[in-house]
Amino acid sequence: MSTLQFATFFINETLCGMNILQIREVISQPGYSPVPQAPSIVIGLMNLRGQILTVIDTRRSLGIAGGYDPESETCIVLKTDAELESHRLSGEWIERLGNDAVGLIVDRMSEVVEIDERDIDASPANLLRHNAEFIRGVVKLDQGLVTILRLERVLAF
Amino acid sequence: MSTNGIDISLLEDFVVESGELLTQAESDLLALDLDESPVDPALINRIFRAVHSVKGAAGFFGFSVIGDLSHVMENLLMQLREGELTPSTEMIDTLLKTNDRLKLLVASCTTSNEEKIDAELTMLNVFLAPLKGAAAHHSLLPSTKAVQPETDQPGRDAQTSVAKPKLSPPESQQDRVQEYQLSIEKRAELGRNGFRLYRLEISGGDHLDQQGLTIYEFLKAVNSVGEVLHCSVDPETVVQMTDEQRAELSIQVHASTVLEPALAAVGFGIPADCIHDIPLKPKALVTQDRSPSPEGPSMGPTNQSKQRLLQPQRRLPQKAPSADSSQSAADAERGVFPLQETVRVKTSVLNALMETAGEMVLARNRLMRCLTHHADGIEGLSPILQQMSTITSEVQEQIMRTRLQPIGSLFGRFNRLMRDLSSKLQKKIKFKTRGGDVELDRTIIEGLADPLNHLLRNSCDHGIESPSEREAANKDQEGTVSITAYHEAGMVNIDVEDDGGGIDVEFIKEKALYRGLMSLEQLDQLSDHEALNLIQMPGLSTAEEITDLSGRGVGMDVVRTNIENLGGTVEITSQKGLGSKITLKLPLTLAIVSSLIVETQGQCFALPQVGLEEAIRIKPGGNDVIERVRGADVLRHRGKLLPIVRLADVLELKQAYIDPETGTSRPERRRNLSDQRFSGPAVFGDQPEGRMEERRRPLSNVQRILVLRVGRNRFGLMVDYIVDNEEIVVKPLSSFVRGCPCFSGVTILGDGTISMILDPVGIVQQAGLKFDELEREEQITGRTEQELSMREPLSIVLLSNDTEETFAVPLSQISRIEKIRTADIDRIGDEEFLQYRGAPLPLVRIHRYLPVQHPATEPATMNVLIPKLYHRRVGLVTARVIDAIETEVNLDRQTIAGDGLFGSAVVNGKIVLLLNIHELALAAYPIDDPASGQLSKISKQLRVLLAEDTPVYQAILTSYLEKAGTSVSVAANGEEAWRMLQADPYDVLITDLMMPQLDGSGLVSRIRTSDKLSDLPILEVISGGVSDSALERKISGVNASVSKLDGPGLLGSIVRLTEETGAMA
């Protein structure tokens, strides 16, 4: 099977996507506690049913100014390496992101799309051209251009 | 046989259980008293069984080297057991060495078959009695002598003499089998030692030839997991047979082993249906077997466990009477197995359980918060919630207890170390352990092994003097090193004590000066106690020379670091010439930490209470003022300069407020900025009512400072509010925030919000505090009072009955504080009881015996303080425990007085009543107080001189003594006491040890060497928190030692002493 499901979401009006397999769950209007002295990309910590989730300020990480709209902001909770082990064994392209529970804050969620891995075009999108290191590639869909993120870089601090 | 096809978990069990068996064998070997003749057969038996079990299991897995070594060791032990050999020190040493080697082999069992054990075999063979020694050396088959039947010798030795092959017809075999009967004694012995007896019926064709085995190989296989008792045919004959003959042949073998039938089949390498379990105690024999065994109490018989590979004999209580064992034997025959007392659980499972339980508590807290508002609306909700809450707490507590282990398992390891050390150092050292049943988290126990090892080595190496030195110093040639574990104030204390030469304080000071760690002026400021604790400083203690010259403290800083990592503290006390005591104070568990929740700039943080000494509240216009010294904030507090760190500054939290006009200075979605507002009751009761209101104006002028101790230094952490006390579950920091120096972890509070856990060490670093400069500043201003540092502060627990009064109890008088449900209190007549640890505990209410206010209502949960009383067991009921603090108490005995009270004092600006628990208990449950009764019989009034520098102890001791009818004079230091003794006659001297000018031991030696006073009875009083062993050891010249807070003990000692010296006349 060559098509994969990708979840898409907006960061500053740019439509971005990631393999849906990497997502554990999606939380709208998350509440989080700030951590003094933490790296700037850490917006805070969140209590996810007793587990501590480190919440990443994705805008900040990508170097995009501005805050989130409390009405639509969403936290994408990522799976840890341990949770993804079985998928990786089956040969899919999945990034190693460590074993900390991490969530990404995005402006708002969009739909889930089918993407053929072969359609991912490595040329950087002009909207994020200063951030080439964060981008794995772009895909042209009917809805427009989807920027596939390189999560490993987004989480680097 | 090989390990192929054997369940890996069985192998793990083998390693773990064999390790435990051999550890037990080691301590049993060490416990053998060679002076006793004959040596304790029960011990030898236990060692034998342990080694035998290891041998059996090793054979099962095909670990031949382990099998061989344990076999020869077993032979030696058997000869010891039979009394053929008498044990010698050398023999025990060899057995210990063999045991060590076996342990190593077991630990690396998969490669053990490649190891060489010739050296050990040779060593053991030296001791083996000559006759069997030769046999054991040549043959790996165990000698079957011990349980030989009266029929033909089936063993291999006998076979060599058989010249001609002898074909035995089946009939005659059958006859022989009938003949074969194990004597009753042997059966009983097998049963007692946990063996089983099997009859193996094999056929020469199916089980030997088709497997390619000779009869010898088969017997050897059986011997490797057990012992062949009898074989129906002569093995040599079988070898000589033709294949046809052999194919027809059926062979019966009787064998004993510890293995269960299913395992035995695997071990013997034959199908299970060929194995027949022969009951060791046929019903007809049971009565005969009841006769008491000469070897003492019998062990449980055959099968304790279906799961365990090895016999769990060591777990069985030895006290099982023999009548019971025949009962359980009968049970076993009916297929009823005794209940398993212990189960093995993986630590990772326990850890996961622990974590889940923590989360369950958090979820419970949230649910309670959520539903309490609806409790009135939904019928029956309240009791359900209440019940669920209680059950959740109980589950959590029980799970926590699964992680606790008795510390005795650790103490046991040191017997060997001490034996080796004393022989290596050629010193006579007696090693005592106490409190082995005190339980601690297993992580802590593991972490304690190294520090304790280190401390014991130090005690032996540098503490205890050589026998000749000891004799010269008028001490017993044999020194004593002891470890004592006990509970105090919710912590576990471990004392490592020796009665050796003590630590030379002057030398430590010299060294500190020489190393440039401290200036001469600084050193002069130090009390002896503080100077002693200098050896925990890295620069000082790692220096090689200090061990050679002064003799103490290599790597004490390492010990301290290790203990602090476990959340504990290290305290050193020493009397030159008399010995040293090192006290480790440790939390019960690491996973749950008692913390203070503090708030700064709207954010909540958890502060572990371990290093927290006190909380200070500073009001504008009050006595305490924060000053600036060299650009740093300091507070003059108790005569010292306390550096102040503002939490908001060190965390770089912005001084942000919501603008009351626009209300939009920054997005307020962050939960713990707003939702945290009303959580929890105020501990110190100083929060303004409407805190939301207060956030809209600048913070109030009241400042709250938490005094924290980091190593030797103290600093004050300034926060906006103290919100609550909470038991928190520590969770690790994610890699993203691990770099933040000020936090040691993160936790979820009861209301679900996340709170960072503050790390005082990191805060000191982050704030760049320079304690040295401050100390220098202190000396310049010269406001430290040396007198002050000599005084012993008193640790007290503050209590409240929800009335206007505050009560206090000396911490060292309390053994436990329990939270109870008020509904659990039973009333019988006027008296109240609590079911506590399986027995009713009489309860005492303060307001019933003291003229204080009665509480209007009772909360649903209360606290019961279990005091360390010396003559009775009671619980003191109080509504709330406010805090435990260490402070100097200026006790006022006049203003508020009465039975059950030491007096009153001002603590943190409030009047506190210091309770005398002993008198309260006596008032509540009068019994004859033996001491005061005797004292009243003394015709003349005793004149007592009390030498004690700390005012609160002066007051407490005087109160005891005066109430008992003696006349008391008080001296504030040794010199003063000496002058008073010269001037007036006294019947008895009661003296403290730590005093300014002339200390207790100086005073005592001056008295003992004087002509006039050398007969004066002297009683030494020791500050709170002493272990019994400290009381046992008294300084030379003193007639008795007693704890300062043990009133009855004090009076009893006085009576005894004055009787002895005839002062009563």
Image: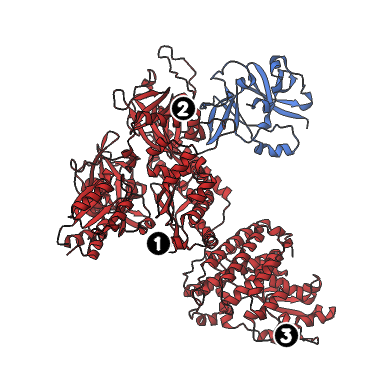
Judging from the image, mark 2 belongs to the subunit labelled B
Instruction: Return the residue at label 3.
Output: B173
Q: Earlier in the sequence, mark 3 or mark 2?
A: 3
- Residue B658 vertical placement versus B326 (above, below): above
Q: Is residue B908 left or right of residue B16?
A: left
Q: CA distance from mark 2 to mark 1?
A: 64 Å
Q: Position of residue A13 (x, y in %)?
A: 64, 16
Q: Is residue B252 left or right of residue B808?
A: right
Mark in the foreground, 2 or 1? 1
Q: Nearer the viewer, residue B114 or B247?
A: B114
Q: Residue furthest front?
A: B1011
Instruction: Report the chain holding disc 3.
Output: B
Q: Using the rendered image, report if marks 3 and 2 lie on a common chain.
A: yes
Helix, strand or loop at disc 1? Answer: loop
Q: Is residue B290 something that shows in the picture?
A: yes
Which residue corresponds to mark 1? B475
- Tag 2 residue: B672
Q: Any idea which chain is the blue one in this picture?
A: A
Residue A156 falls in which quadrant of the image?
top right
Determine whether B669 is above or below B522 in the image.
Answer: above
Please provide percent x and percent y for residue B941: 15, 57
Camera-nearest label, 3 or 1: 1
Chain letter, red in picture: B
Which of marks 1 and 2 precedes in the sequence?
1
Scheme by which the image is coloured: by chain
* Image quarter in which the N terminus of chain B is found: bottom right
Q: How many marks?
A: 3
* The C terminus of chain B - image quarter: bottom left
Q: Earlier in the sequence, mark 3 or mark 1?
A: 3
Q: Position of residue B862 (x, y in %)?
A: 33, 44
Q: Tag 3, which secondary structure?
A: helix
Residue displayed at 79% across by 26% down? A118
